[in-house]
Amino acid sequence: MTKEEVIEVIKRNIVENLDDVEADSIDPTKSMKEYGANSLDMIEVVSTSMRELNIKIPRSELAELGNIDELADKFMEYINKG
Amino acid sequence: MNEIGIEYLNIYGGSMALDQRALATARERDPERVVNDFLIQARSLNPTWEDTVTMAANAAMPLLDFVKREDIGLLVVGTEGSVDFGKPISSNVHSALELPSNVRNFETKFACYSGIAALETAINWVASGRNRGKKALVISSDFSRMHLNMMEEFVLGGLAAAAIVGNDPGVFALDDGIRGTWTSDVYDTFRPSARHEVGNNEVSLYTYMDALEGAWADYLEQNRVDFDRDFEYLLYHTPFPGMAFQAHRTVCNLVERRKKSEVRDDFDRRVLPGLRVAQQVGSTYGASNFAGLVSLLGGQSPPGAGSRIGLFAYGSGAVGEFYSGTIGEQAADRVGQMRIDEKLAARRSIDVPAYEEIEKRRTSHIEAPDITPDFDLPPQLFEEHYRGSGRLVLRSVENFYRNYERA
């Protein structure tokens, strides 16, 4: 799976969990907070994305990430670990 | 059948309350948004003559109208707000309640898990048979530190809960030996001094969800329940009640992926009724699961005897535990006679300037060798809510010796 595909999964879950956000308008260099996500929404986006990608990352590793791109990098790390 | 669990249950939410909307307005935040995000209507607030010792004793005293002191053989008090690093508050509580001298007592600590650690200890003591027919008194007592003008200010509060644990669980029988447990060494929220309550909110929320998933998986290994069918209600630990929605969404989606609206409907039906008390006191800390039971049992349509409840306890640091139990035959009657809603409603409503003054004064007392509480702050509260009530109060601290008495 490519990083672009991972970003698409994250974007789709942002759209499903936040009000009034369209996938095309999401810029991966920004934080989900900029699209109106509160802490609980972010947890849900991360949880549903991990489930879809079939990876399990201790969430405490995710708390310090700054934007969607960094989240995708972290996901790629675990996807490549198999 | 050898049932073990809670025979009697009470909570103590203090004598004052701060309205969440008033606090939001004072902090220039949208009051509706703040209430909807955190699901807190008001937080409990203590005068300077209350602390975790008085709260614990004040939660337990009404239970002693129903249980003889000589029938109690163990007292365990869970707290993350002890007033001493060596002497446990259980010793102060033991004397305040005038329990017999041969009642073993000690304090448990694990952030918000301390109350359930205390409960588990009592359950196992009764289950071992070494209780020689006696009952345990389990108390959880916690209160927030001061966080004026900080992000955490909207999720503060405090509560004490007291439960009699024994072989005749008229209120709540715990499913025997089935505990899903998960642990991890993490700094999410912690109290590195008697003054500080610090941490990282996001780390804490993420760790909570890891703990919930891990504990739920471990529970399922021991008990193959149908999550949607077998639990009439779910009580999740609530650092703030709004957290319970996310917790429920997490477990629901683990069982079967579903839409947010479906989770919301199920949340309204099976989770929200258990948040009633937390919505009135704010953070319930170690007393969270007890507050959930009281919310259900003291509500308009309490669950009937035999209803199965799923519970999740969490302590920062971190540990999570998923467990379950069934409502007892006398549950609604026994909780109802504690008149909990009436007492919560009778708390004095405090405005924001008075709240700030009280919090600053309390903070100035922390670790001070000599204290005389100001019994006029706020005016008339002591006269109207304490004098003659028999509640325990802190009378003074002299050269670090704490003196308590019944008001």
Image (spheres, rainbow, N blue to C red):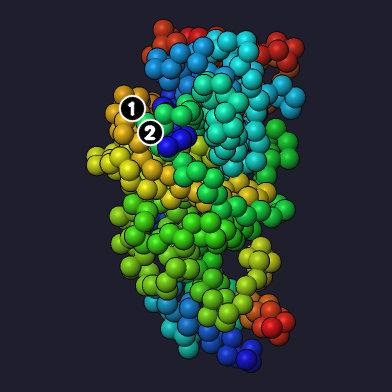
State which tag comes first along the sequence, 1 or 2.
2
Q: Is residue B31 visible?
A: no
Three-letter code for the amino acid on which mark 1 is drawn: Arg
Which of the chains bears the disc numbered 1? B
Q: In what element is the residue under mark 1?
A: helix
Front-lying residue, B131 or B199: B131
Q: Position of residue A54 (x, y in %)?
A: 58, 79
Against A77, is B128 above or below? above
Q: Residue at x 69, y 40 (%)?
A: B191
Q: Kindly indicate whether the residue at mark 2 contacts the one at mark 1 (C-beta within 8 angstroms).
A: yes
Mark 1 sits on what residue? B334
Q: Position of residue B149 (x, y in %)?
A: 56, 44
Taking B176 as reference, is B345 left or right? left
Q: Which numbered disc covers residue A9?
A: none
Q: Position of residue B50 (x, y in %)?
A: 54, 21
Q: Residue at x 63, y 50 (%)?
A: B319
Q: Quadrant of residue B274?
A: top left
Against A43, is B25 above or below? above
